């Protein structure tokens, strides 16, 4: 396990993801610092994210994923981050894949790197 890279932030917008958020944060934190933008969840998403080690920004009331991403990107800019990696809070983006993105970013530091999902592997 490599130490977290403070220049790159893992941003996770979340809404009512109490059943998944702790595992996603725990795995992502092995590699990167994590910011969860809790988008007005009515469950324990924010508290569980904090317990798992994420910094949590609370957005009340619920404003949607786009607004949560914008709030997270603004926070990353304020921190002086060189890059942001986004994950879904529901676990569909495997945090164990983060090192692949970091390696690609080191190889070719371009403005945008997008992962490709295998839709045949996605849960219904």
Image (cartoon, helix red, strand yellow):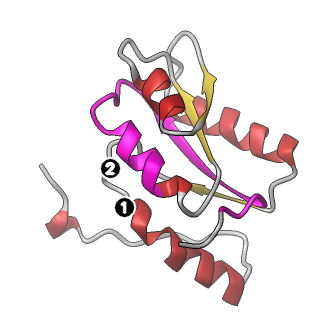
Question: Mark 1 and mark 2: span between their CA atoms?
Answer: 6 Å
Could you tell me which residue is drawn at 54 percent across and 30 percent down? 50
Image location (x, y in percent) of residue 97: 43, 71
Q: Which residues are magenta?
A: 4-27
- Please tell me how many numbered marks the rendered image carries: 2
Q: State the residue in front, 67 or 37.
A: 37
Whether pointer 1 and pointer 2 mark residues with C-beta atoms closer than 8 Å, the reply is: yes
Residue behind mark 1:
94
Question: Dividing the picture into quarters, in which one does residue 102 lie?
Answer: bottom right
In the rendered image, the vertical position of residue 107 relative to residue 44, given as above or below: below
In the picture provided, is 69 more to the left or to the right than 90? right
SS under mark 2:
loop
Could you tell me which residue is drawn at 65 percent across and 51 percent down? 33
Q: State the residue in front, 105 or 118.
A: 105
Q: Residues within 10 Å of mark 1 (few under 14, many from 20)?
A: some
Residue behind mark 2:
91
């Amino acid at each position: 396990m490599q130490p977290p890279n403070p220049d790159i932030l893992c941003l996770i917008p979340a809404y009512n993801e109490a059943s998944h958020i702790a595992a996603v944060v725990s795995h992502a934190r092995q590699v990167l610092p994590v910011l969860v933008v809790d988008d007005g969840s009515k469950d324990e998403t924010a508290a569980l994210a904090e317990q798992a080690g994420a910094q949590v920004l609370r957005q009340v009331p619920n404003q949607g994923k786009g607004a949560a991403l914008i709030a997270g990107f603004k926070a990353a800019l304020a921190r002086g981050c060189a890059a942001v990696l986004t994950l879904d809070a529901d676990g569909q983006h495997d945090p164990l894949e983060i090192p692949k993105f970091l390696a690609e970013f080191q190889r070719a530091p371009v403005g945008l790197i997008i992962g490709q999902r295998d839709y045949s592997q996605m849960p219904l």
